[in-house]
Structures are given as structure tokens and as C-alpha cells.
Image (cartoon, helix red, strand yellow):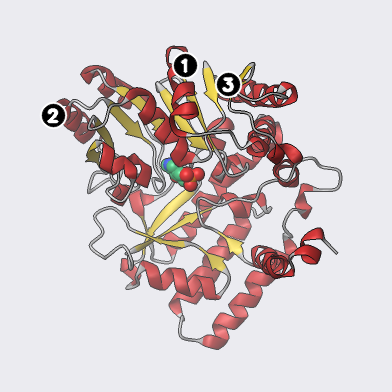
């Protein structure tokens, strides 16, 4: 019996149910992934007991000699993995990493030019509901109505018109390669700083299956979750000249003591992300996503922008007469988890949407290959096409269970395998 089930059977029972749910469903929410068991070990460690305000070699608490070693490893590994001058590994999350950059270089009411949430941006890039939208003057760019790719000419025109202090690239629902060089050119033209939030694509960048923003951006922010496959947390990379400002902006600017078990998990994540095996898996993620996009497209769904270059796609359900919320709910019935998502220029409300966002990272971690993605695509189409046929849905649910049984969670890391 686990300690948890002895001391708190109520939460233990819910944890068991969640484990069974994760095991028996196909996780295709684009921001999710399964961390290696070693990350669970790091996060459950005694590091949670320690306070360590400050940075290695310069702390506000005693007894940090070993903590310093761990954080220094995380910093060095982040720098070397991504080829950056400086890394701060303390942000508690992706949003905190972004707040850190804003705190470091902006004054209240300064102008930020960033991607519209409705076109694939992120809440923390200045959405009205976010604190970032309240404190700064936000101007949004979006995608071109025909190509559904970032409209770089619009970005340039808006930059010239509004003279932003900071330009932000990156988002949560953009399926295409981002032209970081073009963004840099635009930023230079108007004297703006340039930040890339690579939260979704960090694993692909580490594996070199997506171009790196590091040579072009003044700041690169990210989560360690999502494609990077680490524990929940964030980090910032920056040029040497901003190192001190960034460190001050995280502590004491926007956070207190670092979550040290997460800092340790980040160190391990960066180590794993530098391996050949990790790079192979990220290449498979991209292949799996494009295979699924082709499969769905052949069944009459419209893939926004015509396809995907990364781990995710946006599917326009309208050609099949469906909404995003209908698709999300129907696929959940057969154990395939996706989320409804606004597509560019969507006229449906955010609670309904015309699209869904699908990601291939978590199922690839689980061991699914391109052939499996064709199978998954056909299961999706069958469920969506005959959503009122309860018996069919039950048999599709069983097929999903079979796929899950063939790819048990974690076991494919293999006997003795470390990652
Ligand atoms: C997920 C995400 C974040 C937020 O990360 P949290 O760890 O949830 O705070 C920030 N930016 C982008 C682009 C993201 O996709």
C-alpha cells in the first residue's frame, strides 16, 4: 500500500482513477505530454524542503551548497542545449517566464506587439483577461486570411505604425514554422526588443526539427512541459547584456523562492533533451502530426493553413458541418482527448468554436507511430460521422482501449532504460 493510500485514502482514490484515465485514453491535447519516470522521482524529492532565494553563490538562505550545484547544472545544461548566453531556470511556469521578461524591460503602458489569441497567440501575450493585457498597451498581429500563416507584412506595418518596445512571437495554436529572422528584421527596423515564447515547440527546437529562435531573439521564454517533456515549469534564455535584468526580474521582481524540486527536474529534462533518443522521438512527433493531418484531410476535414510543420494542427470542422465543441465531446466519448479551439477568423463563440486543436507529442511518447496515426484518424472520423450511434461509439471506445493496452504508459521506456 502506498503512503498516500494510508494517510489520505480520499485523494489516493482520485489519483488512482486519474492514472487509469491517463492509461486508457489517447492524450491528444497539444500542450500535454508524459514525463519520464525519472522526472516524477525528481519532483517528489526532498528538495521541496529547502528555501533558496537568490541565485547560485548568492543566496538569502544558508545551507545552499548542494542546491547551488543543482541549479548551476540546470543553468549550464539549458545554455548548452539551446546555445544561449544566459539562462534563468527559476520561473514557476511559462506565464511567469513571460512576466519576468516584461518586468525586466518594460514600463507600465509600454507597447507590446504580439499574436492575437484568436489567431493562435497566448493569454500571457496581452490578452484582455490577463494581467499582461491590463498593464501594457497591446497591439495584435494575426495570420493572413488566405494562407492562414503569420502575415509578416502586417507585422511590419503594425510595428512601423505603433513603434512597440517589445515584439513577441510564438503561440499555442500555430502549426507552422515561424520565420524568426523576419521578425528580427522588423524589430531592428523600429528599434524594438524581440522575444520568442517557444513553450509549445521547445522540444522540437532542442532536437533541431524546428529552427531555433535563440540566434535571433533577445529573450526566449518557454515551459519545460509540452514537447520538451519535463515537469511543469518555465525558463528564460537571453543575451548576456540582459542577464542581470532578467535575474532581478524573476527574483525579487516577480517570484520568491524557487521551486527547487522543479529546478532539479529541469536539469534532468535538459540532459535528456540532448540525447539522440530524444531527437529521434521529436522527429517522430512531427511525422505523426503530419500523417494525422493528411488522414483527416482525406476524410473531408479542413486542416488550417493546409497542414502542419510541427507537433500540432488545427482542424476546421465546418466542411463536415460540425462545431469544435461537438468534436471535443464526441471524441472524448471514445477516449480521444482533444480541445475545441477557435480557428483564425472564427465567427463562432469561444465556448463553441469551429475547430479543434490536436497534438501528437503525448501519443508519440507513448510509442505510437505513423501507421497508428492513420488508425487513430479513422477512429476519429468514424466517431464524428456516426456520433449518435451509441453502440458504434462503444466499440470505438474499445478499439481505443486496445491501442492503449498495446502502448502501456511508461513501460515502453523499457527495462533499464533511463528515459
Ligand atoms: C503553455 C504556454 C504558456 C503558459 O505556460 P504555463 O506553464 O501554463 O504558465 C505560455 N506561452 C505559451 C506560448 C504557451 O503555449
Dot 3 and dot 2 residues touching (CB under 8 Å) = no
Image quarter for residue 375? bottom right
Measuring from the top left, give residue 103's x and y in whole percent: 37, 28
- At 60% across and 50% down in the image, what residue appears? 33
> Looking at the rendered structure, which numbered label has been put on residue 79?
3
Left or right, 225 with respect to 166, comes to right
- At 86% across and 64% down in the image, what residue appears? 1
Q: Which residue is mark 2?
A: 161
Q: CA distance from mark 1 to mark 2?
A: 31 Å
Taking depth in this image into account, of 182 and 58 the one nearest to the observer is 58
Query: How many other residues sit within 10 Å of disc 1, few (<14), some (14-19) or many (≥20)?
Result: few
Q: Is residue 249 above or below residue 284?
A: above
Label 1 vs 2, first from the N-terminus? 2
Q: Which residue is mark 1?
A: 244
Image quarter for residue 115? top left
Residue 14 seen anywhere in this rendered image of the structure: yes
Mark 3: C-beta under 8 Å from nearest atom of ligand 1: no
Q: Secondary structure at mark 2?
A: helix
Amino acid at each position: 500500500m502506498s503512503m498516500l493510500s494510508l494517510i489520505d485514502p480520499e485523494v489516493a482514490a482520485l489519483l488512482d482513477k486519474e492514472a487509469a484515465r491517463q492509461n486508457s485514453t489517447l492524450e491528444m491535447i497539444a500542450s500535454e505530454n508524459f514525463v519520464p519516470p525519472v522526472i516524477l522521482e525528481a519532483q517528489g524529492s526532498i528538495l521541496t524542503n529547502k528555501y533558496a532565494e537568490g541565485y547560485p553563490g548568492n543566496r538569502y538562505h544558508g545551507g545552499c551548497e548542494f542546491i547551488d550545484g543543482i541549479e548551476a547544472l540546470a543553468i549550464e545544461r539549458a545554455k548548452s542545449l539551446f546555445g544561449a548566453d544566459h539562462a534563468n531556470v527559476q520561473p514557476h511556469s511559462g506565464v511567469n517566464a513571460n512576466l519576468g521578461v516584461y518586468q525586466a524591460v518594460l514600463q507600465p503602458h509600454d507597447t507590446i506587439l504580439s499574436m492575437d489569441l484568436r489567431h493562435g497567440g497566448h493569454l500571457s501575450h496581452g490578452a484582455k483577461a490577463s494581467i499582461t493585457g491590463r498593464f501594457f498597451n497591446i497591439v495584435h498581429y494575426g495570420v493572413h486570411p488566405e494562407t492562414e500563416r503569420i502575415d509578416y507584412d502586417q507585422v511590419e506595418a503594425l510595428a512601423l505604425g505603433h513603434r512597440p518596445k517589445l515584439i513577441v512571437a510564438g503561440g499555442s495554436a500555430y502549426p507552422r514554422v515561424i520565420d524568426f529572422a523576419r521578425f528580427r528584421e522588423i524589430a531592428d527596423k523600429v528599434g524594438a526588443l524581440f522575444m520568442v515564447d517557444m513553450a509549445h515547440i521547445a522540444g522540437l527546437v532542442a532536437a533541431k526539427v524546428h529552427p531555433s529562435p535563440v540566434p535571433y531573439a533577445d529573450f526566449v521564454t518557454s515551459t519545460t512541459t509540452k514537447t520538451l517533456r519535463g515537469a511543469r515549469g518555465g525558463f528564460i534564455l537571453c543575451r548576456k547584456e540582459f542577464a542581470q535584468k532578467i535575474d532581478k526580474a524573476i527574483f525579487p521582481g516577480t517570484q520568491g523562492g524557487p521551486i527547487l524540486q522543479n529546478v532539479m527536474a529541469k536539469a534532468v529534462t535538459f540532459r535528456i533533451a540532448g540525447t539522440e533518443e530524444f531527437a529521434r522521438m521529436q522527429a517522430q512527433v512531427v511525422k505523426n502530426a503530419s500523417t494525422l493531418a493528411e488522414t483527416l484531410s482525406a476524410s473531408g476535414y479542413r486542416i488550417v493553413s493546409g497542414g502542419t510543420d510541427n507537433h500540432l494542427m488545427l482542424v476546421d470542422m465546418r466542411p463536415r458541418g460540425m462545431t469544435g465543441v461537438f468534436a471535443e465531446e464526441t471524441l472524448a466519448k471514445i477516449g480521444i482527448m482533444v480541445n475545441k479551439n477557435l480557428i483564425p477568423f472564427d465567427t463562432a463563440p469561444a465556448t463553441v468554436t469551429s475547430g479543434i486543436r490536436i497534438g501528437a507529442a503525448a501519443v508519440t511518447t507513448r510509442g505510437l507511430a505513423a501507421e497508428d496515426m492513420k488508425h487513430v484518424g479513422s477512429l476519429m472520423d468514424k466517431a464524428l460521422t456516426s456520433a449518435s450511434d451509441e453502440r458504434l461509439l462503444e466499440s470505438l471506445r474499445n478499439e481505443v482501449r486496445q491501442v492503449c493496452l498495446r502502448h502501456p504508459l511508461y513501460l515502453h521506456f523499457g527495462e533499464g532504460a533511463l528515459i
